[in-house]
Image (tube, coloured by chain):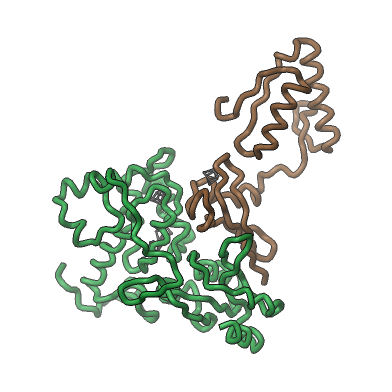
Chain colours: A green, B brown
Amino acid sequence: MQEQIKQWLEQGDIDIFLGYKMIQGHPLPYCFTKENPDDLKDLIVGNARYSLEKMATKIAAEHKELKIGLLTRDCNQRALNVLYIWNQLNPENIKTIGVNCCPSNLKEHGDCSYLEPELIPPIKKMIGIDNNMQVKAAEQFNQKERFNRWMYEFQKCIKCYGCRDICPVCFCKECSLEHTDLIATGGIPPEVPIFHLVRAVHMGGRCIDCGLCEDACPVDIPLRLLYRKVNEIVTDIFDYTTGTRADQSPFNMLGEEVTLKPKPI
Amino acid sequence: MDFKIIPSTCSYCGTGCGVLFQVMDGRLVDTLPMKTHPVNQGRLCIKGWNLHEHVISEKRLKSPLIKKDGELQETTWDEAIKTAADGLKAVIKDHGPDSVAVLASAKITNEENYLVQKFARAVVGTNNVDHCARL
Ligand code: SF4
Ligand code: SF4
Ligand code: SF4
Ligand code: SF4
């Protein structure tokens, strides 16, 4: 892996490479450059994921022609696909090296520590939503109970905007969550459930189910489950699974006519 | 093109969350939570997420100010400290040390807070020490 990246840097295939390095005892994102090729011997995969593609987006916004290489787990790759579709990154300027990802039923060994089911406190199971729940199971609650359980989760929100700030596919210059006409300001929790539902709607066709938002949520709101539901609807209607392809999304087609056949909900 | 990630500690409160500063071409552009930090484990409050903003803020003071002729004017540190010391001395002389109170801060280190109370007790001569959160 190191040799490959070194070669890319030397040949000018890429100008920088975003990977990880141990710094002060922590696996942290690190930008490798052709000026310091020896740094590459310290390149690690690291078991803490950061959104390297979000960093790449920020860099590319200021350095349009820069060729960026990056280490990608499955989630990073899905996010890249969405970023290509939405013209946030130019696929011609990006080169990736795929690495082993989270352990799962399919993969015994993973380099990423994520997806270890968390221990859910009993009170949350009783009156809130278990973060490890699947969409199907969450739909079993009757409407009133479901609403109450979600409201219990939402009202814990401390409005840190961490879910948006960490999200690789939240790149809007002006974010609706800060729009005073849409969501009232000045209180904590923010207006619920509108705050969370606005974001959920935006995640249709955008969210690639990386789980970074839920990871960053200080109050453990099961955001991922919410966005999974939203994208299940997207898949049902448009036959499009967000993040799986880099060419086209039903959400950014121009023109008057819808060519995809809508499916009944 | 120069891009660095610099680990640091949030200076907004005593919790001490681990943050990562993103520095592009020598400019601080963003803050991220450090995922492996034992204190915050990849989470931050809204203050931590926006830590870079007070560093790069246009409104940030770059030199001390003294009010002269009814207006705040830039000055040197020597003059600023002398003015503050003279003012404090005058108050202590006229009204006694207990007319002074010191409010410690959540935004400074433990050691600096120690110095603050030491200053109050040993230099000013008062036990009026409290915390800014109780202001
Ligand atoms: S929450 Fe919505 S408006 Fe805000 S950055 Fe994300 S997608 Fe854009
Ligand atoms: S899981 Fe969360 S952080 Fe990841 S893409 Fe979806 S909304 Fe963004
Ligand atoms: S990360 Fe959690 S607490 Fe913070 S704004 Fe998002 S939902 Fe609210
Ligand atoms: S991020 Fe928030 S809780 Fe953490 S140290 Fe900063 S101000 Fe305190």
- Image coordinates of residue B3 in percent, x first then y, are 64, 67
Residue at horizontal 58%, vertical 42%? B12
Above-or-below relation of B69 to A96 = above
- Image coordinates of residue B29 in percent, x first then y, are 61, 59
Q: Residue furthest front?
A: A108
Above-or-below relation of B71 to A167 = above
> Residue A58 falls in which quadrant of the image?
bottom right
Q: Residue furthest top?
A: B95
In this picture, residue A159 sits left or right of residue A237: right
* Quarter of the rendered image showing ligand 2: bottom left
In this picture, residue B64 sits left or right of residue A136: right
Q: Is residue A180 visible?
A: yes
Quarter of the picture holding the N terminus of chain A:
bottom right
The residue lying toward the viewer, choosing from B65 and B28, is B28
Above-or-below relation of A3 to B1 = below
- Image coordinates of residue A248 in percent, x first then y, are 36, 79
Residue at horizontal 65%, vertical 37%? B110
- Image coordinates of residue A249 in percent, x first then y, are 34, 75
> Residue A56 falls in which quadrant of the image?
bottom right
Q: Is residue A179 visible?
A: no
The residue lying toward the viewer, choosing from B110 and A143, is B110
